[in-house]
């Protein structure tokens, strides 16, 4: 069987995410049985291992992992596959289990090697729950990194585990703002019960209470956020970005409006929304996506890949035939790194589904299997090379 490394890496990620189609499952089985791909599989295992957070290795259940390893490795040898390869496949299977559960025999066997690996010192961890709450009057509060979200109820603030938060000037219809830095994410439940998930390098502004704010509920967004709007037929919910308004009654949708990308993308999962601005007045149906080019004012509605649109909210990077510069833009926000290019930018298109909870080096290793790009990490700068 002849197969490119990037195809092996793609199927590997599909397997890890339990997302193989029937056709992909067949291809993956053939890969595991192909002796010529043994080194490629080992390299993928190695890259994934170094992406496992250190604290997860410390919680490893060695007895359980060893038992599963012994059970798999004692199975009859597959036809045309040498025993050493089958044992390697068994170890890979344990690693796949480890990536889902945070434990693994492979991790135990290689922990001493990892501890002494100088490359592990030059790595960057994933983003985390972090944000700043800006108050009316100019004050601000650094929100707790041990919490995942903020709840606003009757003008009072609390974390989503019930812990109270003192914030003078947050009562009434005064405007508040939550800002996430590069490498940050946070959730907020607004006073009407609407839930908002903020991606990195984003901000949302809103009144502490919608009572007395008029005939609608208006918030302002910069960057990217996913909304689950509480239904209220008497008070439409409006999301204002720099170039358009999105009006809803009660629905689930995602807006990507990073100014530097010169594009506003609204994806509807449930309900109905109306897009307006710059001469536009259009409605979206579930499964549709609107795209506004903010430089040319060109507007279109297209079918949406819903999994791709909300992958970030569900803890994944999902790249769908994207150029490397588009991929690196997303990575730069989440890992808070600067991206530079050495030589021409590759025209190769990348498709992958990768956890946002692994270290940067693990992600870059997966991308490098295309053979079209290589990477170097220098401090908080990533150099992309052909």
Image (tube, rainbow, N blue to C red):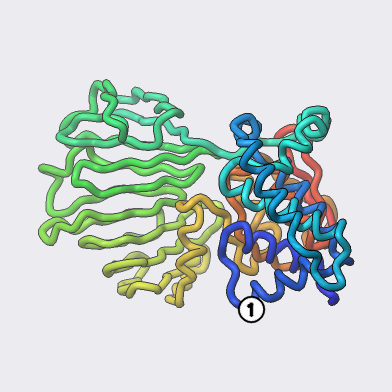
Quarter location, residue 248: bottom left
Residue lying at 47% horizontally and 35% vertically, measured from the top left: 129
Residue situated in front as seen by the camera: 379 or 41: 41
Quarter location, residue 372: bottom right
Residue lying at 72% horizontally and 36% vertically, measured from the top left: 108
Q: Is residue 385 above or below residue 210?
A: below
Find residue 343 and report its horizontal and vertical position in percent. Answer: 85, 55
Look at the image and tell me whether residue 209 can be seen: yes
Image quadrant containing the N terminus? bottom right
Q: Is residue 196 above or below residue 352?
A: above
Look at the image and tell me whether residue 6 can be seen: no
Quarter location, residue 106: top right
Find residue 174 and report its horizontal and vertical position in percent. Answer: 22, 34
Find residue 245 and report its horizontal and vertical position in percent. Answer: 32, 60
Q: Secondary structure at mark 1?
A: helix
Find residue 252 and report its horizontal and vertical position in percent. Answer: 32, 60
Left or right: 93, with 131 as reference point: right
Left or right: 54, with 45 as reference point: left
Residue situated in front as seen by the camera: 108 or 186: 108
Residue on which the image places disc 1: 23
Q: Is residue 334 above or below residue 122?
A: below
Residue situated in front as seen by the camera: 375 or 208: 375
Q: Residues within 10 Å of mark 1 (few under 14, many from 20)?
A: few
Left or right: 304, with 56 as reference point: left
Image quadrant containing the C terminus? bottom right
Residue lying at 43% horizontally and 48% vertically, measured from the top left: 222
């Amino acid at each position: 069987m002849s197969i490119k490394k990037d195809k092996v890496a793609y199927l590997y990620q599909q397997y890890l995410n339990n997302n193989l189609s029937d056709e992909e499952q067949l291809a993956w089985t053939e890969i595991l049985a192909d002796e010529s791909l043994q080194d490629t599989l080992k390299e993928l295992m190695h890259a994934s291992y170094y992406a496992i957070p250190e604290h997860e290795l410390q919680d490893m259940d060695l007895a359980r992992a060893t038992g599963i390893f012994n059970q798999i490795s004692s199975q009859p040898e597959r036809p045309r596959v040498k025993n050493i390869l089958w044992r390697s496949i068994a170890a890979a299977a344990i690693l796949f289990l480890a990536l889902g559960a945070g434990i693994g025999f492979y991790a135990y066997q290689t922990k001493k090697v990892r501890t002494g690996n100088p490359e592990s010192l030059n790595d960057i961890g994933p983003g985390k729950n972090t944000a700043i709450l800006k108050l009316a009057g100019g004050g601000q509060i650094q929100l707790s990194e041990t919490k995942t979200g903020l709840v606003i109820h009757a003008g009072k603030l609390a974390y989503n585990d019930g812990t109270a938060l003192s914030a003078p000037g947050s009562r009434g219809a005064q405007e508040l703002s939550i800002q996430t830095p590069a490498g940050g994410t946070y959730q907020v439940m607004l006073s009407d019960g609407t839930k908002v998930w903020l991606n990195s390098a984003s901000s949302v502004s809103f009144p502490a209470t919608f009572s007395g704010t008029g005939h609608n509920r208006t918030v302002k967004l910069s960057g990217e956020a996913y909304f689950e709007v509480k239904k209220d037929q008497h008070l439409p919910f409006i999301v204002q970005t720099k170039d358009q308004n999105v009006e809803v009654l009660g629905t689930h949708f995602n807006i990507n409006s990073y100014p530097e990308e010169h594009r506003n993308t609204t994806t509807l999962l449930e309900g109905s929304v109306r897009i307006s601005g710059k001469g536009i007045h259009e409605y979206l149906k579930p499964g549709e996506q609107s795209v506004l080019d903010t430089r040319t004012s060109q507007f279109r509605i297209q079918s949406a890949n819903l999994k791709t649109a909300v992958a970030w909210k569900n803890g994944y990077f999902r790249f769908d035939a994207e150029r490397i510069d588009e991929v690196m833009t997303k990575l730069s926000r989440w890992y808070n790194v600067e991206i530079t290019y050495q030589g021409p930018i590759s025209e190769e298109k990348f498709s992958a589904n990768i956890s946002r909870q692994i270290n940067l080096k693990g992600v870059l290793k997966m991308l490098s299997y295309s053979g079209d790009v290589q990477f170097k990490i220098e401090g908080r700068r990533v150099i992309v090379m052909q």
